[in-house]
Image: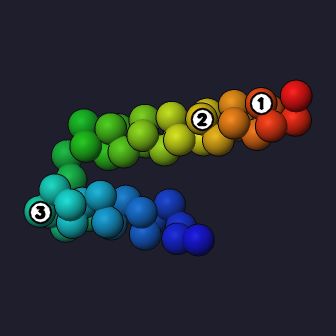
Amino acid sequence: MPSIAELEEQFAKALGKSFDDLTDEEHEAFGVMIAQGLREAAVNKAQKKE
């Protein structure tokens, strides 16, 4: 599984940028996407236990 840093590098590349060129807003957007993915995974795991 890739690290968070590796995923953010891939996110930057998808935007046609390097990691260092990401704006604060783009770093924040990436963080939000990670948080949403973790929340969805937790919900799915909880539903499977029911």
Residue 33: x percent and y percent? 42, 40
Near mark 2 (Cα within 10 A), the count class, few <14, some 14-19 or many ≥20, is few
> In this view of the protein, can residue 21 be seen by the observer?
no
Q: Amino acid at mark 2?
A: Glu
Q: Is residue 28 left or right of residue 41?
A: left
Residue in view at x 25 percent, y 43 percent: 26
Q: Amino acid at mark 3?
A: Gly
Residue 31: x percent and y percent? 43, 42
Vertical position of residue 31 compared to residue 2: above or below? above
Residue at numbered disc 3: 16
Q: Is residue 6 left or right of residue 38?
A: left
Between 22 and 33, which is closer to the camera in this rendering? 33
Q: Amino acid at mark 1?
A: Gln
Q: Quadrant of residue 40?
A: top right
Marks 2 and 1, the one that precedes in the sequence: 2
Residue 3: x percent and y percent? 53, 67
- Mark number, residue 24: none
Q: Quadrant of residue 9?
A: bottom left
Q: Residue furthest left?
A: 16
Residue in view at x 77 percent, y 30 percent: 47
- Mark number, residue 40: 2
Contact (Cβ within 8 Å) of mark 1 with mark 3: no
Marks 1 and 3, the one that precedes in the sequence: 3
Residue in view at x 20 percent, y 60 percent: 14
Residue in view at x 21 percent, y 53 percent: 22
Marks 2 and 3, the one that precedes in the sequence: 3
- Mark number, residue 47: 1
Contact (Cβ within 8 Å) of mark 2 with mark 1: no
Q: For the residues marked 2 and 1, what is the alpha-carbon distance in whole angstroms?
A: 10 Å
SS at mark 2 in the image: helix
Of discs 1 and 3, which sits in the foreground? Answer: 1
